[in-house]
Image (cartoon, rainbow, N blue to C red):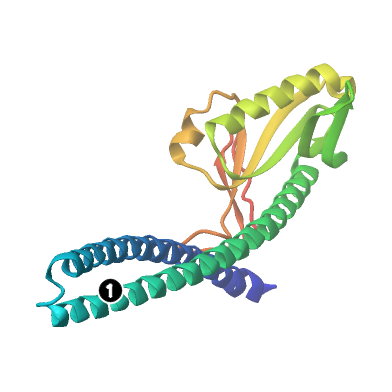
């Protein structure tokens, strides 16, 4: 477990960043190869025009020049075809890299959600008297799913609405306000409780954290994917009351 926290997570983070860098390099190479293809196509067209002119006007006296231009046209077309094949190969690499990134993102998104939910559930049980919890809480009405939260945890006085996000954005807070309204309206068994919104995130800009209009919002960040000093732990970013020291 210690190796997992101190060694594996930082190495995994480095590997993820390396894949992202590789994707960017592949994309840049595709752009350059596209430019070269265009330049070679323009050169080939120019040589064709010169050859056409020589055949029509100067063929008898410039047969050597015609031969040279014909060779140049052949070389240009060969380079153009090579650039096309190389560009196609890079496009396949980009697609494969993007697929790997997508799989990593999907896998670690689920992994972080599980970590965040379990961590908050343990904390809420230990320090806040939570006795009932539902992971992936959902409530339907009018034949459609209208509300879903990653964790609903309940004490005698408070319902903790926990959402796990990769990136906190302004829209994220607006969505939470809508969820809180729906729970108060459509989940009557918890309507008498205080509603405490909680976000567990991986990335959050300080400006977004500080400017949110939601009063009493809790924000906890997972540090396992920090570019520098990645650690398997959670830290408070915002909490109105005195924070509890939270370690992974």
Q: Residue at x 76, y 42 (%)?
A: 124
Count of marks overlaid on the render:
1
Residue linked to disc 1:
73
Q: Residue at x 36, y 66 (%)?
A: 33
Q: Along the line of sight, which residue is nearer the eye, 64 or 196?
A: 64
Quadrant location of the N terminus? bottom right
Q: Along the line of sight, which residue is nearer the eye, 221 or 167?
A: 167
Residue 200 is at least partly visible in this image: yes
On the picture, is 157 further left or further right than 69?
Answer: right
Q: Residues within 10 Å of mark 1 (few under 14, many from 20)?
A: many
Answer with the quarter of the image where residue 171 lies.
top right
| Residue 189, percent from left and from top | 90, 23
| Residue 81, percent from left and from top | 40, 72
| Residue 113, percent from left and from top | 71, 51
Task: Tell me: residue 211, above or below residue 162.
Answer: above
| Residue 141, percent from left and from top | 88, 23
Answer with the quarter of the image where residue 104 lies.
bottom right
- Determine the residue located farthest toward the left in the rendered image: 61
Residue 18 is at least partly visible in this image: no
Quadrant location of the C terminus? bottom right
Q: Residue at x 67, y 29 (%)?
A: 176
């Amino acid at each position: 477990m210690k190796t997992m926290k101190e060694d594996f997570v930082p190495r995994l983070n480095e590997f993820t960043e390396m894949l992202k860098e590789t994707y960017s390099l592949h994309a840049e190479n595709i752009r350059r190869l596209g430019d070269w293809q265009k330049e070679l196509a323009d050169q080939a067209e120019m040589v064709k025009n010169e050859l056409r002119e020589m055949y029509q006007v100067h063929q008898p006296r410039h047969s050597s020049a015609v031969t040279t231009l014909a060779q140049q046209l052949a070389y240009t077309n060969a380079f153009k075809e090579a650039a096309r094949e190389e560009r196609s190969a890079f496009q396949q690499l980009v697609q494969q890299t993007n697929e790997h990134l997508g799989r990593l993102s999907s896998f670690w998104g689920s992994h972080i959600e599980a970590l965040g939910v379990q961590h908050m559930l343990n904390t809420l049980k230990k320090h806040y008297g939570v006795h009932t919890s539902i992971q992936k809480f959902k409530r339907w009405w009018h034949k459609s799913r209208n509300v879903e939260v990653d964790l609903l945890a309940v004490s005698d006085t408070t319902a903790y609405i926990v959402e796990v996000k990769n990136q906190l954005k302004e829209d994220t807070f607006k969505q939470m306000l809508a969820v809180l309204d729906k729970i108060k309206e459509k989940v009557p068994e918890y309507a008498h409780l205080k509603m405490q919104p909680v976000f567990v995130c991986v990335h959050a800009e300080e400006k977004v954290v500080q400017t949110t209009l939601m009063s009493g919002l809790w924000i906890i960040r997972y540090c396992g994917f920090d570019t520098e000093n990645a650690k398997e732990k959670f830290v408070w970013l915002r909490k109105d009351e005195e924070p509890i020291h939270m370690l992974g």
